[in-house]
Amino acid sequence: MTTQDNKVTMGFEAEVKQLLHLMIHSLYSNKEIFLRELISNGSDAADKLRFNALSDDALYEGDPDLKIRIGFDKEARTLTLTDNGIGMTRDEVRENIGTIARSGTKQFFESLTGDQARDSQLIGQFGVGFYSSFIVADKVVLETRKAGSPTDHGVRWESKGEGDYTLEDVDLKSHGTTITLHLREGEDEFLDGWKLRSIIRKFSDHIALPIEMQKEHYGDPKEDEEAPKEEWETVNSASALWAKSRDDISDEDYETFYKHVSHDFQAPLARVHSRVEGNNEYTLLLYIPAAAPFDLWERDAKHGVRLYVRKVFITEEADKLMPRYLRFIRGVIDSDSLPLNVSREILQENALLEKIRSGAVKKVLGLIEDLAQNDPEKYSIFWKEFGQAFKEGPIEDHKNKDRIAKLLRFSSTHNVGEEQTVSLEDYIERMKEGQEKIYYITAESYAAAKNSPHLEIFKKKGLEVLLMHERVDDWLVGYLTEFEGKSLQSIAKGDLDLGTLADDTDKQHQEEATKALEPLIDRIKQVLGDRVADVKISARLTDSPACLVTEGFGMSRTMERIMKSAGQAMPMSKPVFEINPDHALVIKLKSEQDDARFEDLSNILYDQAIRF
Ligand code: ADP
């Protein structure tokens, strides 16, 4: 950091440099998006000011007509965006514009591949915001003053988008933010009023804030800062899209609005737009993105559904309007019934808001159901991107558990090779005569699940087993213990109970073997000692020599491993070691006289079984 008068030069975080470089190269073919990003920021700033001014209207500083103005100067080759929104303090500028204070940043950089096409897709998902101005500018100047602060508290930030930026105190008459882009060589198309108008209409037509440009007349003298009469006109339609009737909104309008609220570059997967009437009236416009954002697994992810009250933005706190398992939903909810002076604290326990939230969740579930029934292709995209988060649903949202359960998809022995396409309803339809339970196995990977020895008897009897191989599955089955009257049963827990499906001769064989092999069982118990709770003759195995089973109500072995790897010190419950009396290795073991060899062989069997 160097200081000269009140001007300091500071270095960007390493990540900012990397992001800038990558962005300029990979987003060039999409360069006009910088305008949408800057307009979105200006519109957010206006929303924030309007909210804060609800309790202190002096913050408007006498200028309550919030807007963004866009101007250009052909000679200086600059493009300027000015908003009279909330503005920033010096500290805020440093925090917001010099760093990437975004959750998921680390994962984002780790996921980059160096392949430009793929990386530009990723960078789109990450969202580039303010920095996108460097795609077309080789110098950016940002001047800002926080609304309500003295005029000499203005800040001027300037950077060439290379290694550093400068910060300087300045006097600013108006609050809000002005961004001046010094365009790169060859970017003169952004100095054309017609072109700018068309980009603004394309990207930002339906944001509620007016975007103004100076009127242009043929034959006017050159633009001159001291021109006595400035005439501004609004170039976007500046009405909240969600407040319009569905019939008046095109798919394209819906899509551009989605990009505005979500900062996503891709079109959304699906949307629901609906107005709820009655004594708690609200409008919602919610979208399912086509790809999971980078911060899907971050606790403090910031974008969610925005709450408005009669078109005034109130909050975007992720958990207010959507439960965590639907945290990927984007969009707006605008309430007519909440009081406008609602503070964020009041929102904590507001009964109306609770109702809005539960109504909105129902709409979203309806949307997902619609995809499941009518658009399998989209549903599979939905499931691939968001299925893991959605599986938290039955755990978190008891009220909607049955609806959510119907939407779950699992891998299954019915269609090995296809991952997560089977619903519980499909499973029940295929259940065998006399089958009462929904069988499943949990494992740490798909390969481990489908190769598990526990499946052998089920294969032999032609019984379908759901293969669960995601971390969340173990939690899920703890909460989802039955579906449509059929209980879910782990095939790796407790004694195997196939009910009426069990074969009498199999049972008899197991009992006889247990008797006949009693000495062998005792000998193995001695070798394995307290590593196991018991040693038993198995009814599950046809091909493998042995397997491990958890006792009836114990935690599953997968779950224990997860907890352990998460650093939870916990006693591992001891498994039951089951052996297959008909397997060649077990038969060999039975006749093994040499104690050392017996011990080796027993340990090998155990080590092999512990993998599942
Ligand atoms: P994002 O908008 O996704 O947070 P940006 O890089 O575009 O990312 O902006 C970072 C932050 O800088 C914003 O969250 C906001 O706090 C602040 N900011 C950007 N532009 C403005 C603006 N015009 N007025 C006030 N604050 C702004």
Image (cartoon, rainbow, N blue to C red):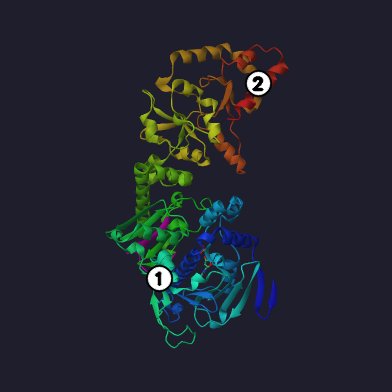
- Which x, y percent locates residue 518? 59, 14
Q: Which amino acid does label 2 sit on?
A: Ser
Q: In which quarter of the image is the C terminus?
A: top right
Could you tell me if residue 555 is visible in this image?
no
Q: Give the range drawn in magenta.
A: 330-344
Q: Which residue is drawn at 67% across and 13% down?
A: 592
Residue 287 visible in rendering: yes
Q: SS class of the residue under badge 1? A: loop
At horizontal 51% and vertical 83% (from top left) the residue drawn is: 173
Indicate left or right for 327 with 9 as reference. left
Residue at numbered disc 1: 209
Q: Is mark 2 on a helix, strand or loop?
A: helix
Inspect the image, locate mark 1, and give the three-letter code of the amino acid beneath it.
Answer: Leu
- Image quarter for residue 479? top left
Image quadrant assignment for residue 306: bottom left
In this rendering, is residue 130 above or below 469?
below
Q: Name the residue under label 2.
A: 602
Does 426 sit above or below residue 300? Answer: above
The answer to whether 115 appears left or right of 230 in the picture is right
- Image quadrant for the N terminus? bottom right
